[in-house]
Image (cartoon, rainbow, N blue to C red):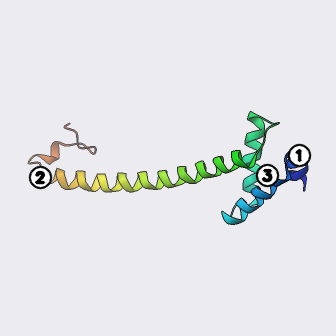
Amino acid sequence: QHLYKKHFQSNPKDFVNLLIYMKENDKSLQEIQKIIHKLETVCPSDISTDKIKIICERKDAEIHLSTSKSEIEEISLKQLSALALLVPHKDNLNKCGGVL
C-alpha cells in the first residue's frame, strides 16, 4: 500500500502491471523495494514498472553470465592442461601455460 501511494498513485495501471510481473517472474516485494530504492537515488520522481523490469532482467542476465563464464573457464583450463601434456618440456611451464 505504501509503495502504491508513494510511486504509482498517479498511474494505477502501471502498479497492476508491476504486480503481474512480480507474480509471473516470482519476484518478492523485498526485491522490488531494493530496486526502487536504487531508482530513487537516480531519479526519485520517475519510478516506473518498465524501469523496475529492466533492472530485474539485467540482474538475471548478470547471474547467467557469471555462471557461463565459470563454465567456460573450467573447460578452457581442462583444454590447456591437455595441451600441456603434448609439450615436451612441460616442467618449464608455469600454471597459466607460459614459459618460466
Query: How many residues crowd mark 1 within 10 Å: few (<14), some (14–19), many (20+)?
Result: few
Name the amino acid type tagged 3. Answer: Asp
Residue at mark 2 to residue at mark 1: CA–CA distance: 69 Å
Which percent across, then down, holds residue 5? Answer: 91, 49
Residue sitting farthest toward the left: 88
Asked if the residue under mark 2 is in contact with the one under mark 3, i.e. CB atoms within 8 Å, the reply is no
Name the amino acid type tagged 2. Answer: Leu
Say which residue appears at 54% left-offset and 49% top-offset. 62
Name the amino acid type tagged 1. Answer: Ser
Rendered image quadrant of residue 23: bottom right
Which residue is label 2 attached to?
86
Asked if the residue under mark 3 is in contact with the one under mark 1, i.e. CB atoms within 8 Å, the reply is no
Quarter that holds the N terminus:
bottom right
In terms of secondary structure, where does tag 2 sit?
loop
Which residue is label 3 attached to?
14
Q: Nearer the viewer, mark 3 or mark 2?
A: 3
Query: How many residues crowd mark 3 within 10 Å: few (<14), some (14–19), many (20+)?
Result: some
Which residue is label 1 attached to?
10
How many numbered tags mark residues here?
A: 3
Give 29 or 82, whichever is nearer the viewer: 29
